[in-house]
Image (cartoon, rainbow, N blue to C red):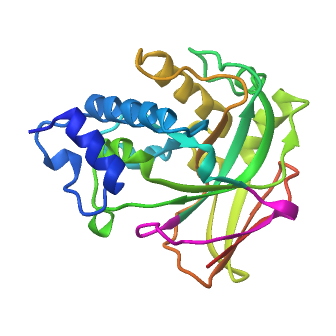
Amino acid sequence: MFNIDETVNELMKTGGKGMTRPTEQGDFSLHDAYNVAHQLANTQRANGKTLAGRKIGISNRAAWDSLGLTDVVWGYVFSDTVFEAKQNAYTLSLDGLSQPKLEPEIVFGLNAALPAGTRNGAALLKSAEWIALGFEGVQCPYENWQFKPADLVATFGFHGALIIGEKKMIDDPEALARALVNTSATLYKDDTVVHEGGGTNVVDPPAAALGHIADLIAADGDATPLAAGELITTGTLTAAPAIGAGESYRVSVSELGLADLTLTLR
């Protein structure tokens, strides 16, 4: 039977490693999962961690039906897992990450709280100060990446690390919103193309995805409200490959005026 305090305490101790999936512990809903996530975030802050922002997960609509979803999910991101890539290159250690995968993403930095109740990309981007390419290293402690959305939400959003490339200030939200609809993305492994995608892989696409997370957080009275200074990573632009030490990846996007971002793994 699910017990929120016991689940939170066990997740804080283990990160999910060696645990039974929360959804196998009884009637564990997505609502329960967010309650766990909020309590985990509060505990992390009480332990001295600083909230950096949020992540959007399962942003590809094609996956929603099979997972029983009608919207994206989201999670908290803390500053000790966020790294800036100087000259758009970074080396990341995979130590401690379970079954890591790599997601190339668009990242926004907020200068104001996002408006709720809109999917208008230009209106939402008025609350964003900068845009950047990013790599999220995601992880899953449950065998063979077998999970339900509630497991992901409860288990720290499956977040491992976020690498942020060069930040570009947003001076024309309307033009950027249009560009995000048309942007294409190419993921290279050791300079060989491994996946292609783009803004259409991210719900509505990335600018409007901000509206999805704004609404979900506004509707949850226990969630920490979004605020200026936070970052939001909007979901993977391509398929997410499993990764290992010794590999190198590079992501390139069109339309946005962002330089390629390179990640070396060790």
186 horizontally vs 76: left or right: right
93 magenta-colored? yes
Residue in the picture at 42% in, 35% down: 43
Farthest right residue in view: 171
Compare residues 135 and 123 and report the one nearer the observer. Answer: 135
**Quadrant assignment, res 233:** top right
Q: Position of residue 89 (x, y in %)?
A: 79, 67
227 magenta-colored? no
Residue in the picture at 44% in, 16% down: 219
243 horizontally vs 169: left or right: left
Residue in the picture at 73% in, 29% down: 229
Q: Residue 216, can we see it?
A: yes
Residue in the picture at 26% in, 48% down: 10
214 horizontally vs 220: left or right: right
Q: Which residues are magenta?
A: 84-101
Compare residues 142 and 8 and report the one nearer the observer. Answer: 8
Above or below: residue 100 compared with residue 108: below
Compare residues 21 and 61 and report the one nearer the observer. Answer: 21
Q: Position of residue 206 (x, y in %)?
A: 65, 40
Q: In what quadrant of the picture does the N terminus appear?
A: top left
**Quadrant assignment, res 64:** top left
Above or below: residue 99 compared with residue 215: below
Q: In what quadrant of the picture does the C terminus appear?
A: bottom right
